[in-house]
């Protein structure tokens, strides 16, 4: 495991905010694809913020990891995986 820093710039219904933190990621995953691994953590942070704000309209304006690495586009492309194995059809 290793730590990376992530910063997201958000617009929540016209209110701009910045959230940042340090996150542990799998070293092998990060070495294989650092941008995608960081983007997953940024996406998780974004979803956490959405839950905390009552799922208000949230626009991701910018996401970076370790200060200068822009992952905005990658974070916007991530979609949740839906487990449909328990569906009756």
Image: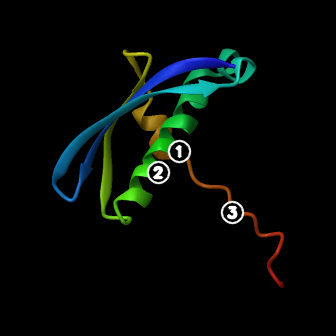
Horizontal side of residue 36 vs 61, given as left or right: right
Q: For marks 2 and 3, give the one nearer the viewer.
A: 2
Tag 1's secondary structure?
Answer: helix
Residue positioned 16% across, 55% down in the render:
14
Q: Is residue 71 above or below residue 49?
A: above
Q: Is residue 74 above or below residue 77?
A: above
Determine which of the numbered discs, if any, sits on residue 82 in the image: 3
Q: Position of residue 69 (x, y in %)?
A: 42, 18
**Distance Cα–Cα, label 1 vs label 3:** 15 Å
Q: Is residue 27 above or below residue 55?
A: above
Callout 2: 10 Å neighbours few (<14), some, many (20+)? Answer: few
- Which residue corresponds to mark 2? 48
- Marks 1 and 2: CB-CB under 8 Å? yes
Q: Position of residue 49 (x, y in %)?
A: 40, 51
User: Which one is nearer the viewer's eye here, 48 or 58?
Assistant: 48
Horizontal side of residue 49 vs 61, given as left or right: right
Q: Position of residue 60 (x, y in %)?
A: 34, 45
Tag 2's secondary structure?
Answer: helix
Residue positioned 60% across, 26% down in the render:
24
Q: Position of residue 31 (x, y in %)?
A: 68, 15
- Which residue corresponds to mark 1? 44
The quarter of the rendered structure image containing the C terminus is: bottom right
**Distance Cα–Cα, label 1 vs label 2:** 6 Å
């Amino acid at each position: 495991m290793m730590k990376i820093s992530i910063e997201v710039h958000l617009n929540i219904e016209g209110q701009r905010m910045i959230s940042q933190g340090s996150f542990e990621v799998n070293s092998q995953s990060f070495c294989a694809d650092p941008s995608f691994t960081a983007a997953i953590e940024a996406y998780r942070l974004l979803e956490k913020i959405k839950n905390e704000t009552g799922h208000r309209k949230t626009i991701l304006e910018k996401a970076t990891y370790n200060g200068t690495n822009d992952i905005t586009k990658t974070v916007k492309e991530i979609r949740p995986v839906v487990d449909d194995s328990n569906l009756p059809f």
